[in-house]
Image (cartoon, rainbow, N blue to C red):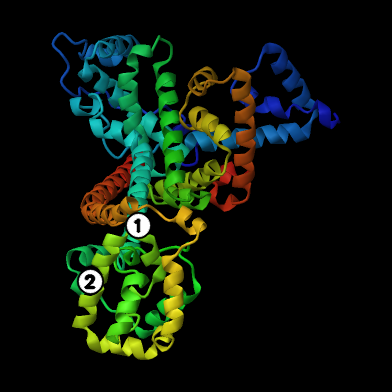
Amino acid sequence: MGDDPQRFLRPPRLPFRHFGQPTPGSILSATAVGKRDSAESELIARAQTGDLGCFNLLVQRYQQLAYNVAYRLTGDADSADDATQEAFILAYRKLGQYRGGSFRAWLARIATNCAYDCLRARKRSRASSIEEMVEAEERNPELVNHRQSPEQQALASELSHAIGRAIIDLPPDQRAVLVLVDLNGLDYDEAALALNMPLGTVKSRLSRARAKVREALMASPELLPGSLRL
Amino acid sequence: MPNQQEHVTDLLSPYLDGQVSADERARVEDHLATCGLCAGELRQMSKVVSLLRACPQVRPRRSYALNRSLVTAPAVWPRLARLAPVFTALAAVLLAALVFTDVRLMTVQWALQPQGPVVERTLLQPAEVPAPSTAEAEAAADSSLGETAEETVPSEARVIATPAAAAPQALSEGSGSSSSTAQPAAGAAIAEPEATEAAGAAEMAADETPGEMQKSLATSEAAAAPAEVGEETEKALAPTPQEQAVRPTAPAAVEQPSAGLAEVRLVVGWPWALRLGEALAATALLASVGLWIWRRRLA
């Protein structure tokens, strides 16, 4: 269990709690937890009618995804915070344009665009460099605790920093695909939908991104667990 | 061993994720069975993917649940902030135009300062005409001897005196060609009644400042050679036809000082409006720049 990377492959069990003030007659109930897919469709339908409480339930469900996408794309917690908030505001306003399909991919697309907007605004406001982004990344060790031991947490933190550095060094187009697929668990179709690109482009960019990350990690093998030494 | 072109490097990543077709899968597996290089690359790729997916999630700092104030229509200020560059440009242009006008009017006022007020004072209170220095008197005397009446006439000279009236009189009184009165060009260009009046003013000025006039007399070549002055005076009194052609008529000459006065009054009256406009434009410029900065911070 100690060095088993598969323990991280489990999707994070995000809490599904009541939030906000849903309107009377809302579909919120204990059974909604077990029927997440169908419940999500109803939440979206109600949110499209202006039910802010229902939309806040969607926010609660996907805010970690949106925040992680923004955080990995910007490399900065402050920018990720702004981008995430802006993404949900924009999502609520544009919810009428959602025409079905993967809501997660639709939201990831908005979060990606907001993250890019934050990146552009940050570059306008000050000369942003990769070093600054890496330093900002290293200042934000707010990682989710997966019930690890302190040693495992330290290892995960170091590994996260090394991977974060390698991700920040990627070109933006490859970085987005890697962040969506490998770090946030979207499948290829969802990534293609989120990034508005053909499936073949997603495959090729992801392949190149993984190759570059491998080269970057091979430069610092001491950070890698023994079984994962390249 | 397969050559470089047969390697399946590009297919390894989607192969790991099961995102290849059946044909591609068969091709990759056939190749991996014979190519150690690609097999090793697949193992490394698999470890990289495992590492990436093992990377822990970052915990959001807060809840991003929305409230009504966040999702209502944006306030007016953000909308105005979009136009901040336009406001800034307009305010800058307005301020530049006002400052340019102000500076230009100040220049005109400054240029009129030694002459314009003299005109006014000379017309209203002739006794207050300042006596020019000795050097000016010499220059005036020289010009009276050497120049014709066609040359440019100083504004105050038009209303003060003519050599025909002032110079002989000054010579006879022993005060010589006194300062501003010793300018024949002006005298030649003015009507006779006004010249007489101005000559009287010059007399008054000479009476009030006899010391200075005597000093001017002592240094004036005009006083040293009255005969020449007399000749020049006669010459000035008998202008050539060409001179007559270029001379202004008497009414026009009389209108000159009143136009100058109006201009002086205009200059004196405008700066308040100009300064107020400049202050408003500067305030608008600062506000639009602040709006711009706020917009960039907001972005």
Mark 1 against mark 2, which lies toward the viewer?
Answer: 2
Q: Is residue B263 above or below residue B65?
A: below
Q: Is residue B272 above or below residue B235?
A: above
Considering the numbered disc 1 on the image, is that residue within a helix, a strand or a loop? helix
Q: Is residue A3 above or below residue B139?
A: above
How dense is the environment of label 1, judged by Cα within 10 Å: few (below 14), some, or many (20 and up)? few
Chain for disc number 1: B
Quadrant of the snapshot with the C terminus of chain A: top right
- In the picture of the structure, the residue carrying the numbered disc 1 is B103
How dense is the environment of label 2, judged by Cα within 10 Å: few (below 14), some, or many (20 and up)? some
Q: Is residue B11 left or right of residue B148?
A: right
On the question of residue A146 being in view, the answer is no
Q: Residue at x 23, y 86 (%)?
A: B210
Type of amino acid at the residue the image marks with label 1: Val
Q: Position of residue A184 (x, y in %)?
A: 45, 29
On the question of residue A172 being in view, the answer is yes
- In the picture of the structure, the residue carrying the numbered disc 2 is B200
How many numbered tags mark residues here? 2
